[in-house]
Amino acid sequence: MCNQSVGLIQRAVEETGISTVSITLVESIAKRVKPPRALLVPYRLGHPLGEPNNPTLQHAIIAETLELLQDEGTPPILKSSSQKGEFDGQN
């Protein structure tokens, strides 16, 4: 799903009182759309959880994303992932 669409849906859901988080790949879109809570990951489009078949990395990204729900800052909250890697999305 498009990063922009997800951010807009998040804002609408949050208006009903439900907290949301997302993983985003494009910082410029996230800064423009201002989703309530988003984790910016350093991977190419189509690979928000990094390289395939790497459950350790994928679980770490999901955990880092869910931790944003505990952030007591005022939304929008855009955090860069601490996960790094050589994966460039090309197989």
Image (cartoon, grey):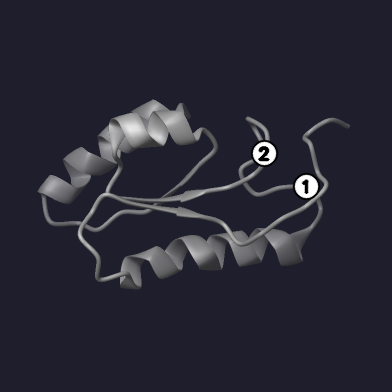
Q: Is residue 41 left or right of residue 66?
A: right
Of the residues shown, which amino acid type is indicated by label 2? Answer: His
* Labels 2 and 1 touching (C-beta < 8 A): yes
Percent of width and height locating residue 6: 37, 35
Residue holding disc 2: 47
On screen, residue 69 above or below 91: below
CA gap, disc 2 and disc 1: 7 Å
Which of the 4 image quadrants contains residue 68? bottom left
Q: Residue at x 11, y 49 (%)?
A: 16
At mark 1, the secondary structure is loop
At mark 2, the secondary structure is loop
The disc placed on residue 51 is 1
On screen, residue 39 above or below 28: below
Q: Residue at x 61, y 43 (%)?
A: 48
Q: Residue at x 18, y 49 (%)?
A: 14
Percent of width and height locating residue 89: 77, 34
On screen, residue 4 above or below 71: above
Of the residues shown, which amino acid type is indicated by label 1? Answer: Glu
Which of the 4 image quadrants contains residue 62? bottom right
Percent of width and height locating residue 79: 44, 55
